[in-house]
């Protein structure tokens, strides 16, 4: 089971939230730190607001694009 931590950026869908993760890595040649964002659709039965930090766990596919479930609000 893969566990991820991210921030809720949208809660407009029924039982679905969009969680955004910010990843940083060094450029292979220039060694400049680069930022990349990843937006994940996750299933949630909790009442979450935009800006909440949540913990996600991978599950079997719930729908076409939802492969994660919100476990806890941090």
Image (cartoon, rainbow, N blue to C red):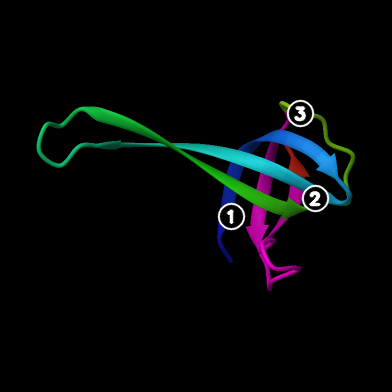
Residue 54 part of the magenta segment? yes
Dot 3 or dot 2, earlier in sequence: 2
Residue on which disc 1 sits: 3
Residue 66 part of the magenta segment? yes
Instruction: Work out which quarter of the rendered image holds the N terminus and state it.
Output: bottom right
Label 1 to label 2, Cα distance in Å? 17 Å
Q: Which mark is residue 50?
A: 3
Q: In this rendering, would 10 be left or right of 30?
A: right
Residue at 26%, 29% in the rendered image: 33
Residue 35's image quarter? top left
Label 1 to label 3, Cα distance in Å? 20 Å
Residues drawn in magenta = 52-71
Residue at 15%, 42% in the rendered image: 28
Q: In this rendering, would 54 be left or right of 49?
A: left
Residue on which disc 2 sits: 16
Percent x, y of residue 4:
57, 49
Find the residue positioned furthest to the bottom: 60
Residue at 83%, 36% in the rendered image: 48
Dot 1 or dot 3, earlier in sequence: 1
Residue at 61%, 49% in the rendered image: 40
Q: Which mark is residue 11?
A: none
Q: Secondary structure at mark 2?
A: strand
Q: Residues within 10 Å of mark 3 (few under 14, many from 20)?
A: some
Q: Secondary structure at mark 1?
A: strand
Percent x, y of residue 29:
10, 38
Front position among marks 1 and 3: 3
Front position among marks 1 and 2: 2
Vertical side of 61 occupied by 26: above or below: above
Q: Nearer the viewer, residue 38 or 64?
A: 64
Q: Residues within 10 Å of mark 1 (few under 14, many from 20)?
A: few
Q: Secondary structure at mark 3?
A: loop
């Amino acid at each position: 089971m893969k566990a991820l931590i991210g921030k809720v950026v949208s809660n407009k869908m029924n039982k679905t939230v969009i969680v955004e993760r910010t990843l940083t890595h060094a450029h292979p040649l220039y060694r400049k730190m680069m930022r990349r964002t990843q937006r994940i659709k996750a299933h949630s039965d909790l009442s979450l607001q935009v800006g909440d930090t949540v913990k996600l766990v991978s599950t079997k596919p719930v729908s076409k694009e939802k492969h994660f479930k919100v476990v806890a609000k941090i």
